Structure formats: structure tokens, C-alpha cells
């Protein structure tokens, strides 16, 4: 796992959540630009997940419990934004933007927690 990329992902997720929250505050439904940013976040998260899984396979030494926890967080990290997007785009009002903001904060927390587990269980 690349820790610098994790921090970039976390901060980008928080920034995106703030943007979605401001959109909700001004009574704006999710737009094309919100979706485009979501796709960018998801692509970066996928790159980070692939790198992390490769490093888990290549460098043994973590306990099975730690590996399972990291993989679980990575899976959650990859599904939280698409689930939030599916819920948000079904609701074409400002509350769709609220759902995206919540998904963005959840995304950032998952990135932080994955990074913490990665660093603590490192060899």
C-alpha cells in the first residue's frame, strides 16, 4: 500500500464530500461533474487496492487476521462510492448530494482505517 496515495485519497474524498455538502446546501442535485469526480476517486482507490493486494501476496509476514481485515477494508473502500452513487442518482434532489457527501466521508474514514491497519500490522 502506498501511504502517500492513501493520504491523497483520504483528502480527495473529504474534499469531494465537502463539495457535495455545499451542493446540497445550495439546493443542487448531483451533477455530471460530481459523477466524474466520483469515477476519478474510484479509479485511484482501485489502483491503491491492487497495489495493496499485490504487496500482501509478495511480502508475507502479516497474520491471517490482519490480511483479512485489510482485504475487508479494501472491499468496503471499493464499494462505498458506487453504492452511494446508486442511492444518490435515484434521488434527483438535494438529498442526492447529501448521500454523496456521506459516502465521501465514509470513503475517507475507510482510507484512514485501512492505512492504520496496514502500518500497525506491517513487518
Image (spheres, rainbow, N blue to C red):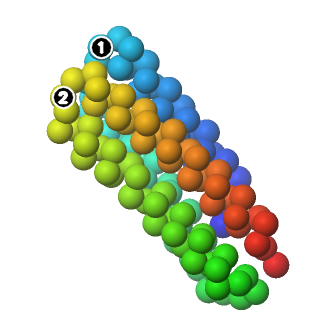
Residue at 43% in and 24% down: 21
Asked whether 73 or 59 is in front, the reply is 73
Relative to 87, does residue 120 appear above or below in the rendering? below
Residue at 26% in and 37% down: 88
Determine the residue located farthest toward the top in the rendered image. 26
**Residue 98, located in which quarter of the rendered image?**
top left
The residue that mark 1 highlights is 27
Indicate the position of residue 44 as horizontal and vertical percent values: 50, 55
Q: Looking at the image, is mark 2 or mark 1 earlier in the sequence? A: 1
Question: Helix or strand or loop: what does disc 1 sit on?
Answer: loop
Side of 54 relative to 36 (left or right): right
Cα gap from disc 2 to disc 1, whole angstroms: 11 Å
| Total numbered labels | 2
Question: Helix or strand or loop: what does disc 2 sit on?
Answer: loop
The label shown at residue 96 is none
Determine the residue located farthest toward the front in the rendered image. 65
Residue at 59% in and 71% down: 69
The residue that mark 2 highlights is 92
Side of 38 relative to 15 (left or right): left
> Would you say residue 5 is visible in this rendering?
no
Quadrant in which the N terminus is drawn: bottom right
Badge 2 density bin: few <14, some 14–19, many ≥20, Cα 10 Å: some
Quadrant in which the C terminus is drawn: bottom right
Residue at 35% in and 20% down: 24
Indicate the position of residue 45 as horizontal and vertical percent values: 50, 57
Side of 123 relative to 15 (left or right): right
Relative to 58, does residue 28 appear above or below in the rendering? above
Indicate the position of residue 54 as horizontal and vertical percent values: 59, 79
Amino acid at each position: 500500500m502506498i501511504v502517500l496515495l492513501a493520504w491523497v485519497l483520504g483528502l480527495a474524498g473529504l474534499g469531494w464530500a465537502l463539495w457535495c455538502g455545499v451542493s446540497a446546501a445550495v439546493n443542487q442535485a448531483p451533477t455530471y461533474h460530481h459523477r466524474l469526480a466520483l469515477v476519478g476517486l474510484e479509479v485511484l482507490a482501485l489502483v491503491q487496492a491492487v497495489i495493496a493486494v499485490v504487496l500482501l501476496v509478495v511480502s508475507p509476514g502479516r497474520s491471517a487476521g490482519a490480511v483479512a481485515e485489510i482485504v475487508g477494508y479494501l472491499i468496503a473502500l471499493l464499494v462505498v462510492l458506487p453504492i452511494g452513487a446508486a442511492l444518490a442518482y435515484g434521488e434527483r434532489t438535494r438529498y442526492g448530494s447529501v448521500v454523496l457527501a456521506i459516502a465521501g466521508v465514509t470513503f475517507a474514514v475507510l482510507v484512514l482505517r485501512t492505512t492504520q491497519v496496514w502500518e500497525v500490522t506491517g513487518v
